Each structure stands twice: as structure tokens, then as C-alpha cells.
Amino acid sequence: MSMAMMRAKVDAESRQGEEKKQVEKKRNVIVLCMRFFQDHGYINSVQQIQNETNINLDRIDAADNVDLHSIITEYEDFYEMRFGRKPKLTRKVASGKDDGKDGDRKLSLPKLPPEGTCNPSPPLPPSDDGSRRRERSQRAKSQDPATRGRERPPPAPSSAPSELGDRSAGGADGKPQSVEAFDGGLVGQSVGSKGGKKDPVKGAAEEAGEDHYENQVMRALPNYGADKEFRELATVISRDILSKNPGIPWDSVIGLNHAKYLLKEAVVMPLRYPQFFTGLLAPWKGVLLFGPPGTGKTLLAKAVATECETTFFNISASTVVSKWRGDSEKLIRVLFDLARHHQPSTIFIDELDALMSSRGGDGGGGEHEGSRRMKTELLIQMDGMMRDTKDQVFLLAASNLPWDLDSAMLRRLEKRVLVNLPNAEAREAMISASLPDGFAEKLDYAKLASLTEEWSGSDIRLLCKEAAMHPLRRLMAEIEAAEVSAAQADGKTNRKRAAEKAQEKEKPLASVQNLKVGAVLESDVERALQTVHRAPAAHLDRYCEWQQQFGAA
């Protein structure tokens, strides 16, 4: 590898590391705020932040010796020591006026209640976890600043249940603590922490940022101003943002090497080496995966969602099609607005032919005008006058009927890749992966691959599942026969056996617990071949012809 390539790789890794640090810092700020709200009883606020940011305190929480109050206290002490005055952290805003300095602050926070108004309910004591955090912050404040960073107080032991009722909001001398000296008239619900011991392995993996979805920090919705309609539509689209890892790495997709490389070229490489993908070499904006059903088009989309670390929109027809006039076009516009807002992002539309069939088919008399407007809006958003060439928005589409798609849509999908039926080598690899040695005995994988010609990957999976069910069925038959023979030996009727089973439903027999499912035999696979048949796949030759005429792989 040349020095220039090594330097480019190091620069890309350094830039990605810096971006991860920024995301980590933003996540830490949100976690500290959520923990502060949780300790002071603002449950609804914590739940709303969890819904908007995809951060849950059950997965990641503040460290034992860190809380928001102690951080602000240390910052104030440092600022006063350096500049001789206290820092100004807040500012007063004139009611009903806006200084125009920050456009994002037009939607102000709720005002504090005026003086003299009583609270609707008496203040509840803070949670025990919050008390321990405040005690630790007080100890940290009293330490010498030179040794504060090195010495960490051990976590306080949990108090006995009898001490909770005697503990008040004040200190030991009856005076209120400095943390609770002024609550601003805001009263929250007192809650306990759901903490407990954390898995060190899982915690280390989360801190290392290995799982994109576990560490993903979702941005707030765009500011649509006073337009509540667009904000409601954005909330509808946000439900289709993938928040759980599909768990499909590239290696689990057998075959389809060209399609996998093309998707990496379109999504992964531009994010890793953006300096190369400029001008004429700008990354691909759209890829169409077409082919017979069950060949792995949706599986490739799951691999993109797993590996590419982008905001993934899983869009279906029910999301963008509305019965109300004009809402479908607005949903398409809001979809791309959110994709640009959360970029880098990937929009996946499965069964694209259901949304973007050819306009004007059958003479143009059978298509509704609302459908035409929606298609036009989608085409404009993909490649219109207002589109920015620097937007990192990638459209991935899948279809079983590519010849029914609109020609303008095909032009915007720059790459059109045929995902065909697996060859003999891929079929053999699929069968050996589903029925490996140890789980199955004495299977001729090459022979099975030859017997499953023109089978799709989904058909092969069903065949392997049916073959694996035969040992389980034999085991179930043995268990039922043993139960019947035991009941007949005791002379019990069917009604008595049913009553005993209802009483001992959660107490399985010790003999059943030690049983194991046997291995899959060659005879099991032969029986599965007799009962399982491949799904009908029409137009096999037409896919190849269409690929030769209109494909762009």
C-alpha cells in the first residue's frame, strides 16, 4: 500500500473517530440531563426525550460519581477562579418579544408560575438515587481541586427501607441543602432508579460504539414554525425510522457479491472517503434491486441497515399514501425533508412498483390524479431544482416487476441490479449453513444443490426448516407416547390427566428436561423434498432480457 493510500485511510479513520466523539459528547449531555430530570421527578419529560433521541436510561446511564449539578458547580468554581466572577449561564427573555438572536428559540419553554401561587400538590421527596448523587457532588465540591479528578468516592451503599420514610429534604441539621435551596416552584414526581448491576461486557461494547442503533442519537424534528400540519406528518414519517439493529451483516448474505459491492460503493465508501467522491465521482443516489421473489432483495436492505451506520427509513405504501386530498404529496416532501435533516440517511422502498407504476398506462384513463401528483412529487424530490448535490440521501428500492416502473423513475435510479436465483455454489453454501455438520449427519450438499435447481433462497430455507422439523416431530411423538403409557399404568382417566396437566403446567417432567432433539438425517431431507416445492417464479427469462436492455450494473 502506497503512502498516499495509507494517509487517506488514516485521515478517514481520524475523521470518523472525531465524528464519533462528537456524537458521544452529545449523547453524554442528553444522558446527564435525563438523569437529572429522572432524579427530580420529571417523568414525562424523560419519556419524551427517550422517544425523540432513542436513548434509554436502562441501556446507558450516568456514572456513579458524575451528575449535572456537580459538573455545573465545578465549572462555576473554575470560571470564578480564572476570571474573578461567576459565569452567566442563563439570560432573561422579555415576555412577548424576541431579540432575533436565535431563530430556534422562538418556541420558548413554559414560564415559571408567578410569585404567590401555590403548587397544585406538595413537593415529594426526591428519589434515593438522586440523594446519593447530591451527596457525592457535595463531597466532590469540598475536595481540593487538585485531587478532585484523581480521587473518586466509592458508591454509597443502598439504604434500608426503614430509612426512606425518615429521610427529609433537608440536611442533618434541619436546614435545606444547597441543591434543594431553590426549586423555582417546579415540582416533579418522586421516582426510584431502575439501575442495578450492569453487564460489563455489554457496557464496554456500548461505550466503544460498536452498535450504531444502541448509540444513535436522534435529532429533534425540524422546526416547521407555526405549521402544525407538517409537524404532524413528520411525526408519522418518524415512526418508520429503524431503531433496532436487524442483525444482518454482509457475511450472512450468501452470494450476491456484485450487489453487495455496489451497495458498499454507494453508501459505505462515500462516508468513509468523501474526498474522492466529488464532482463527476459523486456517490450514487439511487439503486434498484429487481428479480424474482425470494432471492434476497430485502435481505440486502437489512444488511445495508446493519452495516452502513446511516439513518434508515423503512417506507411502505401505507406510510405515504393517504385518503385525504394533498396529503400524499406532503408526506413525500416531509419524508425527504427528514432524510436531509437526519443525513446521512437511506430510504428503502420495498415493492416500488406499487407506488411508481408507469404513468399514463392503458391510455391514461385509469389512473387517479392524486396518484399522479404523488409520483410527480417523488420525482421532484429525487432530482428537482431545489435538490442539493451535497445531500447525503440514498434511495434503495426493490421490485419484482421492473418493467412496470415509470421511465422517469428508472432514470433517477442510477443503478439497476438483477438479483437472480442462486447458482449451484450458492445453493450448496446455503444448505450447509442451515444444516451444518453436527446438526445434520451425512448429508451430500452437492447433491442437494443439484436437486434444488431454480430454487430461490427463501425456498431453500423452507426446505431446510422442514427437514429440521422431522427429528423434533419424532421426539414429540416419543414424549406423548411416554405420557400416555404412564397414565394408563396409573389408571387415570382423560379428565384427571387434563386436570393434573393444568395444575402442573409450569412443572415439566425431569425426564423431558434432559431430552435432546436428534440430528437431521438424509432421509429427513428426502422426505422434505417430497413435501416442499419451490414457489412459482414467472418471467425468469424476462428478467435477463430486461437486464440486458435497461439494466445498469
Image (tube, grey):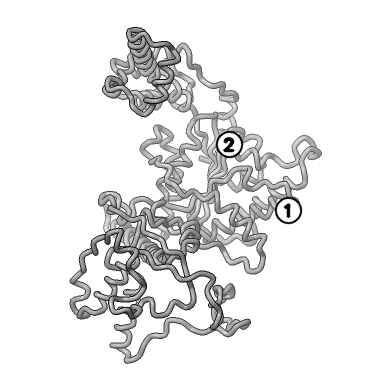
Q: Position of residue 202 (x, y in %)?
A: 30, 50
For this view, does 245 lie left or right of residue 550? left
Q: Secondary structure at mark 2?
A: strand
Query: Does residue 44 lie above or below 464 as drawn?
Result: below
Can residue 178 be seen here? The reply is no
- The quarter of the picture where residue 356 lies is top right
Q: Report whether 423 appears left or right of 209.
A: right
| Identity of the residue drawn at 45% across and 71% down | 123
- Expressed as whole percent of the image width and height from the top left, the position of residue 64 reads 28, 64
Q: Residues within 10 Å of mark 1 (few under 14, many from 20)?
A: few
Q: Position of residue 514 (x, y in %)?
A: 26, 22
Residue denoted by label 1? 326
Amino acid type at circle 2 is Ser
Question: On the image, numbered disc 2 is attached to which residue?
Answer: 399
Specify the amino acid type for callout 1.
Answer: Gly
Displayed quadrant of residue 142 = bottom left
Q: In the image, residue 58 lies at what x, y percent?
A: 37, 54
Closer to the camera, 49 or 143?
A: 143
Q: Residue at x 37, y 23 (%)?
A: 431
Residue located 36% across and 76% down the image: 179
Residue 434 in sight from this viewpoint: yes
